[in-house]
């Protein structure tokens, strides 16, 4: 539709029609399947307003979306098509590893491909908007939603933001793309104590330096929507924060797209104590330029009253509606409200061989080898194997937020391993979790429902017995352990990051047999592995690995692929260390290089200050040594660059893919700076028994920081550059920034 026609349409719409465009409801309002996660209270919205609704939440599939579209267009006076929006966070039907696992690839290029293929599947199923990428910087593994984030570093997250947005949106014009809706703006990952929906309170410097960059990168990449956070940031709920949304996001960053609330977050302004009632909440959210009210009654029941009594200028509603209509027009929905969706296209698109192959490759790159004593891995196919644990034959490897994925479509670990060793023994050994109270908190509705997912005491004893028997008859025991799907994700906050007690008990029993033991961890967050690392030989962090997870894990175990994954979130020595992240600020009494000794340092009495496995960490089957770091100049001028080089030597029989990480530290600044800060990285292939020189160019732009007014600062002085395989093991060289 031409812009002139679109303006005429807006002008001809009634106030009720306009308000309808700003409302998003889920499937149960349209006699469609509703797979939404979240509270399901009745909203008290009239049928008339339901008929005028502008967008639909989490209804997917060619048949379902075509049916709802036809129904709603017939009811809407101007036959305006609805837009279908959904959680396509790390895949639609072909599911990739969780975003924390995607982050561990350190490979934005392949992640862009993943999001492009996810967009192809989702668009074939009638979806136009994906609620992703989630770009909250995460520092606290207790928070369940770390599952959805690429990790703890703002620079790396920014690189992923760009890749994910571009992947989603690159084929919109061909009807094979979806609009990216980045979230949760802003700072949701900083919730206090890792507790879901809790307060976020931080300095402006911290916000600007660590939390905002990835969102800004998404805006720069052209993301068409932004979703607000469910939390209050520095005392103001993000959904009504005019300075954050209208000023920073729209005016300063130049964001022209749609801002949508998170699930019911406009109504929750009342619960925050920021709005007096639903009408007041409507005013404050719209005044902050929130365009769409997701699953709350506020706009539906409040906006008309505000206009009628003169509190709200209808022009503000018009501005929001214009943004909604413009996006629909960009998608060509006025010409083709079904956007080429058909059952035939959907069938051809989802779970294709090419998409499965990509999922397998990405899942392989996401696996992080944390430990490999005595080079137990890779495995020798001539040995006898037992696969033991609750994830041995389990198909639920997708994680909580793969809402459209089907476990039945995934490759289990057992199925993956059988391709290499057909006669592998297997035993469940124990349940994923036997804590009834925790299962109840996860959402199981009754004791009867809980009893369906956990064994009786007699069954548990027998499961243990069968597992030990299988282990005793084998040379190598592969333990498939981890979290339940419902333990990680939204509302999955935990204070104890250890494996469940029943799993720990089984590990103890298996360890006592003296066999070679390989531990596979299936999880949505960093777990505390201090209490198991000495009881097993090798540890692989596999995340929730997705549709091809079992195949990818087998490829790693038997050496078809050499592990290359590197952590993007620190693994704690103890749960009590959280929040834990590598780029923390320097203190006056650091553990190392302090003027003080003994007790009076920034440390714990009962645990190290450092993580068990640091940011950037990961092993391979080969060994790469870092040697001869040099700088071509010890002075860097503002308008020039210096070059840093390091020699990497592969003294093993394995071809390796190494992630070379470049960090810096500003020694003296007017705002205390992190002990290290990632500023660049490179993935390099190094053949067996060869060496390679890797270089980085450093400019003054990489040395800036933010003050507590939000201004970007560049100060002359002394800096240290670090190059290494992770954030702890680095070579270092100093240089000086001068005019």
Image (cartoon, rainbow, N blue to C red):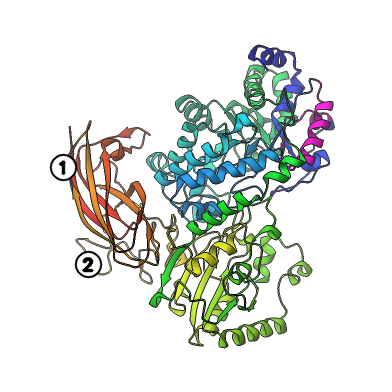
Judge whether 176 appears above or below 5 on screen: below
Judge whether 573 appears above or below 241 on screen: below
Q: Tell me which label, 1 or 2, sits earlier in the chain.
A: 2
Please tell me which residue lies in front, 600 or 666.
666
Q: Which mark is residue 434?
A: none
Q: Quadrant of the C terminus?
A: top left
Q: Position of residue 500 (x, y in %)?
A: 58, 72
User: Residue 499: which quarter of the image?
Assistant: bottom right
Q: Which mark is residue 597?
A: 2
Residue 86, visible in the rendered structure: no
Count of all numbered marks drawn on residues in the image: 2
Please tell me which residue lies in front, 247 or 510.
510
Q: Position of residue 512 (x, y in %)?
A: 50, 87
User: Residue 336: which quarter of the image?
Assistant: top right
Tell me, yes or no, whether the highlighted magenta stretch contains residue 61. yes
Q: Which residue is mark 1?
A: 633
Residue 459, visible in the rendered structure: yes
User: Neighbour class for label 1 at 10 Å: few (<14), some, many (≥20)?
Assistant: few
Q: Position of residue 585 (x, y in %)?
A: 32, 51
Please tell me which residue lies in front, 330 or 674.
330
Residue interval drawn in magenta: 48-77
Tell me, yes or no, whether the highlighted magenta stretch contains residue 389. no
Q: Marks 1/2: CA distance?
A: 36 Å
Name the residue: 52% across, 65% down: 555
Q: Position of residue 193 (x, y in %)?
A: 50, 56
Judge whether 323 appears above or below 437 on screen: above
């Amino acid at each position: 539709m031409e812009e002139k026609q679109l303006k005429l349409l807006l002008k001809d719409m009634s106030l009720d029609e306009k308000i309808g465009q700003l409302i998003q409801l889920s499937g149960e309002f349209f006699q469609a399947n509703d797979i939404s996660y979240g509270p399901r209270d009745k909203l008290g919205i009239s049928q008339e307003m339901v008929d005028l609704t502008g967008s639909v939440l989490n209804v997917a599939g060619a048949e379902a979306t075509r049916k709802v579209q036809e129904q709603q267009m017939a009811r809407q006076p101007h036959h305006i098509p609805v837009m279908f929006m959904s959680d396509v966070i790390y895949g639609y039907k072909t599911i990739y590893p969780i975003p924390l696992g995607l982050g561990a690839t350190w490979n934005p290029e392949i992640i862009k491909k993943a999001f492009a293929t996810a967009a192809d599947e989702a668009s074939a199923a009638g979806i136009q908007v994906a609620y992703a990428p989630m770009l909250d910087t995460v520092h606290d593994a207790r928070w369940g939603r770390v599952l959805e984030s690429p990790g703890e570093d703002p620079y790396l997250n920014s690189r992923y933001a760009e890749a994910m947005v571009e992947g989603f949106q690159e084929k919109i014009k061909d009807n094979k793309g979806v609009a990216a809706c980045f979230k949760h703006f802003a700072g949701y990952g900083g919730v206090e104590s890792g507790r879901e929906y809790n307060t976020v309170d931080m300095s402006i410097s911290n916000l600007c330096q660590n939390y905002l960059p990835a969102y800004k990168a998404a805006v720069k990449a052209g993301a068409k929507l932004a979703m607000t956070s469910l939390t209050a940031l520095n005392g103001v709920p993000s959904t009504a924060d005019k300075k954050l949304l209208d000023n920073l996001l729209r005016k300063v960053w130049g964001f022209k797209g749609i801002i949508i609330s998170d699930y019911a977050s406009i109504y929750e302004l009342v619960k925050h104590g920021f709005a007096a009632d639903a009408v007041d909440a409507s005013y404050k959210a719209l005044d902050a330029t929130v365009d769409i009210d997701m699953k709350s009654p506020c706009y539906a029941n409040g906006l008309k009253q505000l206009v009628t009594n003169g509190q709200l200028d209808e022009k503000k509603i018009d501005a929001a509606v214009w943004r909604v209509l413009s996006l629909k027009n960009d998608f060509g929905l006025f010409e083709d409200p079904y956007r080429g969706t058909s059952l035939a296209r959907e069938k051809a698109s989802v779970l294709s061989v090419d998409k499965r192959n990509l999922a397998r490759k990405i899942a392989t790159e996401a696996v992080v080898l944390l430990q490999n004593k005595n080079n137990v891995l890779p495995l020798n196919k001539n040995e006898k194997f037992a696969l033991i644990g609750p994830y041995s034959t389990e198909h639920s490897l997708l994680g909580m937020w793969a809402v459209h994925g089907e476990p039945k479509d995934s490759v289990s670990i057992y199925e993956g391993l059988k391709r290499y060793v057909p006669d592998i023994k297997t035993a469940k050994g124990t349940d994923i979790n036997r804590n009834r109270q925790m299962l109840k908190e996860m959402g199981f509705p009754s004791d009867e429902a809980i009893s369906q997912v956990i064994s009786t005491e007699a069954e548990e004893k027998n499961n243990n017995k069968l597992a030990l028997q299988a282990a005793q008859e084998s040379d190598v025991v592969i333990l498939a352990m981890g979290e339940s799907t419902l333990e990680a994700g939204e509302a999955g906050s935990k204070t104890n990051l250890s494996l469940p007690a029943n799993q720990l008990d089984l590990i103890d029993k298996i360890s006592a047999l003296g066999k070679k033991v390989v531990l596979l961890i299936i999880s949505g967050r960093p777990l505390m592995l201090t209490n198991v690392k000495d009881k097993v030989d090798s540890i692989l962090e596999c995340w929730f690995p997705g549709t091809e997870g079992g195949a990818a894990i087998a490829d790693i175990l038997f050496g078809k692929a050499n592990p290359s994954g590197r952590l993007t979130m620190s693994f704690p020595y103890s749960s009590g260390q959280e929040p834990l992240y590598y780029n923390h600020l320097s203190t006056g009494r650091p553990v190392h290089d302090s003027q003080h000794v003994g007790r009076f340092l920034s440390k714990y009495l009962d645990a190290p200050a450092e993580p068990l496995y640091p940011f950037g960490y990961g092993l391979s089957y080969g060994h790469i040594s870092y040697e001869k770091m040099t700088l071509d100049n010890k002075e860097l001028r503002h308008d020039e660059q210096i070059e840093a080089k390091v020699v990497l030597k592969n003294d093993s029989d394995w071809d390796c893919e190494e992630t070379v990480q470049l960090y810096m530290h500003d020694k003296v600044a007017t705002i205390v700076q992190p002990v290290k800060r990632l500023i660049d990285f490179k993935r390099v292939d190094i053949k067996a028994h060869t060496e390679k020189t890797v270089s980085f160019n450093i400019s003054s732009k990489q040395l800036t920081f933010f003050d507590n007014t939000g201004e970007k600062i560049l100060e002359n002085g002394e800096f240290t550059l670090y190059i290494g395989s992770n954030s702890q093991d680095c070579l270092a060289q100093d240089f000086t920034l001068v005019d």
